[in-house]
Amino acid sequence: MKLQFLQTLAAVLQHGSFAAAAKDVNLTASAVGLQMRQLEDFFGQPLFDRSARQVRPTPFAHEIAGTLAQAVDALEALRSRRDGPALTGRLRLGTVESAQVTLLPAALQVLREQGPALQFAISRGTSSALLDEVKAGRIDAAVLVRPQSGGSRRLAWTPLARETMVLIAPPDARPAPPVEMLRRYDWIRMDLETTGGRIAAQYVHRIAPRMRCAFDLPGSESIAAMVSAGLGVSVVPALRQELLQAYPVLQVPLGKGAPIRHLALVCRHADADGRLMRAVVEAFRAAAHRRFGADAVAAADPRHRVRQRQNP
C-alpha cells in the first residue's frame, strides 16, 4: 500500500465522488477507483457502499481519514515546536463569541504549556470588527467567520473548520421540510451584523423569499433559549451538546445546499512566520480537530487536500 492511496481516499471523502477527486489529484476516475479497491484489499473490508447509484463511504473510510488527519496535525506540531525555548511575549487575540467557548480554552491550554510566561489580551467582537482590528495592528490575530468574499489576500488565513448550519425548532415541533417550518413558526433571525447571520438570512430568503423576521438576536445561545421556549425557529450553526442539554430543540438538517460558515484564524503576513504565531495556529488547529472532528477540519483546510501529480 502506498501513502498516496490514503491521500486519494481523503480527496474522495472531501469531494464526494471518484470523478471529482480525480480532478483534484490529477488522476483518471478509473485510477482512483483502482486505488480504492487496493486499499480495500489491504484493510480487508469495504471502504465504500456501491449498492446505490453513487458510491457512499463507509464509517471505516471516515475513520481512516480521521487517523490520517491526526497524523498530519501531529507532524505540523512537531515542525512548529522545533525544540526551541519556551514561548514568551504578549499575544493580543480576538475571537467571535462562539469560538470563546468552542476553541479558545483548548488552544490556550496548549499555549500555556508551551509558554508558561506568555501573556494574553483576549477580546471579543464580530467577524468584521475583528478583521478591521487585525488590519489596523490593534490585535495580533483573530478567530472569526471568514467573509463570504474570501477575505483580504493581504492577510494570512488558516482555515479551522467548516460548520454546516441547521434549522432549529421547538422541541415539540412536528418534523417538516425547512420551508414548511418557516411558514408554521416565527423566524428568529441571527443578527445581520455577524457574518454567520448574513449567511443564514440569505438561505432563508432563498427558500422563503417573503419571509420576515420576528426579531434579531446576536448569538446561538440566546436564539436556542427562545426557540426552546417555543417562540419560533431559526437557522444557526449546529448546536454544541451543552446547549442542546440546556435548551432542548429539534434540529432539522437542511440537506444539499445548506448554508455553511468557515471558521478561520487570521493574522498579518508579517507575523505569520514568527514562532509564536506558528504555535498559535497549531494550537487552534488542534482545538478545532477536537471540537469539530476530522471531517470538518479536513473540509476546511486545503493542506489536508491532496496535491498529487502523476509520475512522469
Image (cartoon, rainbow, N blue to C red):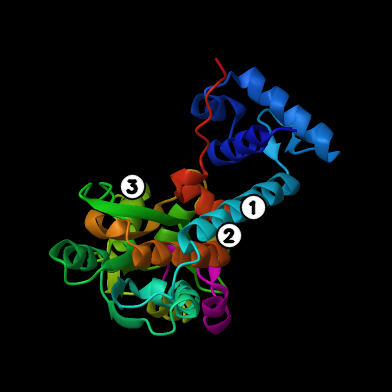
Q: Nearer the viewer, residue 268 or 106?
A: 268
Specify whether residue 133 is in view: yes
Q: Amino acid at mark 1?
A: Gly
How many angstroms separate mark 1 from mark 2 (CA)?
Answer: 8 Å
Residue indicated by mark 3: 206
Please identify the residue farthest to the top as the structure is shown. 312
Q: Which residue is mark 2?
A: 293
The magenta-colored residue range is 232-250
In the displayed structure, 34 sits above or below 14; it is above
Q: Camera-side residue: 118 or 292?
A: 118
Q: Is residue 192 left or right of residue 74?
A: left
Residue 136 lies left or right of residue 187; in this view the side is: left
Which circle's residue, 1 or 2, is located before the other in the chain?
Answer: 1
Q: Look at 32% across and 68% down and name the residue there.
A: 190
Q: CA distance from mark 1 to mark 3?
A: 34 Å
Q: Is residue 238 visible?
A: no
Q: In the rendered structure, find residue 66 and report the number of the disc placed on it.
A: 1
Amino acid bearing label 3:
Arg
- Which quarter of the rendered picture does the N terminus lie within? top right
Position in image of residue 105 (x %, y %):
47, 79
Calculate the distance from the C-alpha at mark 2 to the C-alpha at mark 3: 29 Å
Q: Residues within 10 Å of mark 1 (few under 14, many from 20)?
A: some
Q: Is residue 27 above or below residue 58?
A: above
In percent of width and height, residue 27 lies at 57, 21
Q: Position of residue 61 (x, y in %)?
A: 71, 44
Give yes or no for contact between labels 1 and 2 (Cβ–Cβ under 8 Å): yes
Q: Residues within 10 Å of mark 3 (few under 14, many from 20)?
A: few
